[in-house]
Image (cartoon, coloured by chain):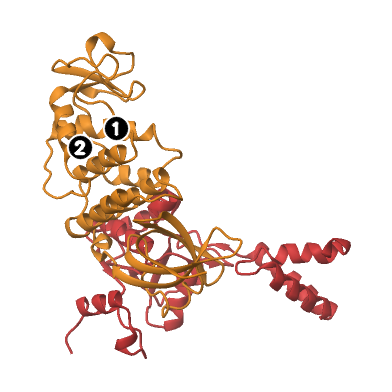
Amino acid sequence: MLDSIPSFARLVAELAKFPGIGKKTATRLAFFLLRQPRAEAEALAGAILELKEKIGFCSRCFHITESDPCPICTDPGRDEGLLCVVEQPQDLIAIERSRSFRGRYHVLQGALSPLDGIGPDQLRFSELLQRLKGGAVRELLVATNFTVEGDATALYLAGQVRPLGIRVTRLAHGIPTGSDLEFVDDATVNRAVEGRRDL
Amino acid sequence: MHPQKSEAIILQHIDYGESDRIVTFFTPEQGLLKGFARGARKSRKRFGAALEPFSGVRLIWRQRPNSSLLNLQEAELLDLRDGLRRDLKALALAAYGCELVAALFGEGGAHPEVYAMLKSLLDQLNVDGGCAEYRLLLELRLLRLSGHEPHLLHCAVCGGALPEQVHFSVEQDGSLCPACRVPGARPVSLATLGSLARCRETPADRFAGFHLGATTLGEGAPLCTAALDAQLPRRIKSREFLDRLEPLPPAPGGAGHS
């Protein structure tokens, strides 16, 4: 059906490459763009091109940035001695959104996954160890996800970093704020009990 | 389609789209199956942590029309095996075991003994951590359960008795007497072959209580890995990570792979 309108079919095919977008949704988005004024479509196309032209990875922390080093790495108000390790730039953004951390970051660009054949060499581990050997960091906060991959990454990191004499900590794990205990799964309750603290 | 229910071990999951997951799991009566878990990434209410790899679960599913993927309806977590997440070697061995089972026993067919063996391995790793003995036992048992156990205590070619120092060849499917030795066969002591044979005769789901000497591990572990490799249809991705954490012990005398 779409073959008779090649330009429309091309746009649908491109949109369908996005994560979570199937052909049906891609078609709906294409019709939406068709109805928009030309300026709107140009703004979208321009934004995509600008993203590809301007954004790269910080050579120090591997977060996305328009300038290298990134604003977080050059911010003099941040604690040099505190380094937070995350899997992806989205995780860094989540921690920044909480405004609870004022140290610096290191983005591993993934997590160890034995089942997928992803080992330390595919991630930014060697760059992290180089930063740590610089001597300024006194605590490494491991903020990887609480999945098998995130836990494997945290264990590996702890094994590599402890011999350097740097304190290694992990994000706390437990009951989400605002939730009822009776609806929380057993594994989370178990970790929350293990991680209990004095009041 | 009526819903089906079974105990299972989660072998792996991959994210699908923004909120769904495709889950590979192993059941005692139907072997390896794959299911679609709608909303498993975003909503914790329906599946919770039950679909995490290595978990013991009770699953309910339905067949999907025109699809080989099952539709996962419910998952009750029986055992997360949280101890695996505190020991990297245990976690790497658990991944290795799950991947080997998936590679050797693909979709279709009941494998209750394999299920019992994998469950027992994961339980043992969960409480005891990882060690070289468990890897050797896992490989030895999988060779046996998949019907590929090598000849150990007699010559694989002539069937004759073996002297103290013998050789082992994956290509010849086992131990070789001096007369039948082929180029590339690896030297191995009769004592090691005896230890492997005794381990092989123990119940497949028993992992606790084995203490193997350095010679048995040094000679036996590379031998089992090489014998298993010859039967595998594809590369085992978790092997590299496991070898990095705990390299195979060096074979005494510097024997190489055949």
Q: Amino acid at mark 2?
A: Arg
Q: Is residue A125 above or below residue A12?
A: above
Element marked by disc 2? helix
Q: Amino acid at mark 1?
A: Glu
Report whether residue A159 is seen: yes
B255 with respect to B2 (left or right):
left
Q: Which mark is residue B149?
A: 1
Q: Is residue A182 above or below residue B252?
A: below
> Could you say which quadrant of the image residue B136 lies in?
top left
* Residue on which disc 2 sits: B200
Report whether residue B88 is seen: no
Chain B: its colour in the image is orange
Q: Quadrant of the C terminus of chain B?
A: top left
Alpha carbon distance from label 1 to label 2: 9 Å
- Position in image of residue A94 (x %, y %): 46, 77
State yes or no: discs 1 and 2 in contact (Cβ < 8 Å): yes
Q: Is residue A195 above or below residue A55?
A: below
Residue density around tag 1, few if under 14, some if 14–19, many if 20 or more, within 10 Å: some
Q: Chain of mark 1?
A: B
Q: Is residue B206 above or below residue A69?
A: above
- Residue drawn at point x = 74 percent, y = 62 percent: A13
Count of numbered badges drawn on the protein: 2
Of B171 and B28, which appears nearest the observer? B28
Residue density around tag 2, few if under 14, some if 14–19, many if 20 or more, within 10 Å: some
Element marked by disc 1? loop
Q: Earlier in the sequence, mark 1 or mark 2?
A: 1
Chain A: its colour in the image is red
